[in-house]
Image: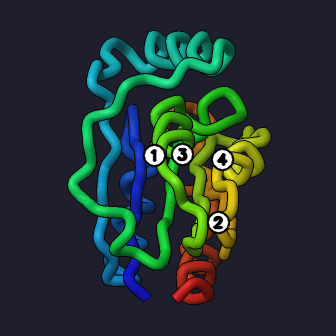
Amino acid sequence: MKTLIVYYSQAVGNTERIANMLQESLNADMEKIDTVVPYTGSYQEISEQGHKEVNRGYMPELKPINSNLDMYERIIVATPTWWYTMAPAIHTFLANHDLSEKGVVLVHTHAGWPGHCLEDMEKLCNGAKIISKKDIKFDSDGGNNLETSMTEIEKWIESIK
């Protein structure tokens, strides 16, 4: 099955780390989502900006991706959790791309407060077949210590092969 991983990662790069694991295991193509106007500042400043953006439903403009989604049967979408939901960049991506008729895997990284991220992502995947949803926990102080076991992650990746 031809697979594309689309992900957004910010701060310490936890979501990118998971996307790289998926790419290596699934031999998938990969696209990093980037906003036209990058987030700058400290972790705290970006977190506060993200909170405001999530609360008002802001969808930032994205740089174009190189991949043609029509060429893929399965799309894996990975996001960090921002204030109990997906990062605004992933909101923009999902709202602006038709994933109907695709198999979709939804992944989010979080620091112990998963909120309604996966449910919100699924709502934007109208007509898609949701193959799997996975939350992956890192430590709660903004660090990069993986708390979901590697065994659990490896079993999950094996289940979506």
Instruction: Tell me the distance, in whole angstroms, between the alpha carbons under discs 4 and 1.
Output: 28 Å
Quarter holding residue 48: top right
Does residue 147 show up?
no
Label pair 3/4, CB-CB below 8 angstroms: yes
Q: Position of residue 61 (x, y in %)?
A: 37, 25
- Residue type marked 2: Ala
Classed neighbour count for the residue bearing mark 3: other residues with Cα under 10 Å, few (<14), some (14–19), many (≥20): some
First in sequence: mark 2 vs mark 1: 2
Residue placed under numbered mark 4 in the picture: 124
Report helix, strand or loop for mark 4. Answer: loop
Mark number, residue 128: 2
The residue positioned 63% from the left and 20% from the top of the image is: 57
Tell me whether circle 2 and circle 3 mark residues in contact (CB < 8 Å). Answer: no
Q: Is residue 109 above or below residue 18?
A: above
Disc number for residue 144: 1
Badge 2: residue crowd in 10 Å (few <14, some 14–19, many ≥20): some
Image spot of residue 92 (x, y percent)? 49, 35
Q: Residue furthest left?
A: 66
49 displayed left or right of 101: left
The mark closer to the camera, 4 or 1, is 4
Residue sitting nearer the eye, 39 or 102: 102
Mark 3 or mark 4: name the one nearer the start of the chain: 3
Tell which circle, 2 or 3, labels the residue nearer the N-terminal end: 3
Give the vertical position of 54 relative to 78 (above or below). above
Disc 3 target residue: 94
Check disc 1 and report its element: helix, strand or loop.
loop
Tag in front: 2 or 1: 2
Q: Are marks 2 and 1 in contact (CB under 8 Å)?
A: no
Q: Give above or below for 12 relative to 100.
A: above
Displayed quadrant of residue 148: bottom right
Give the spatial CA distance, label 2 vs label 3: 11 Å
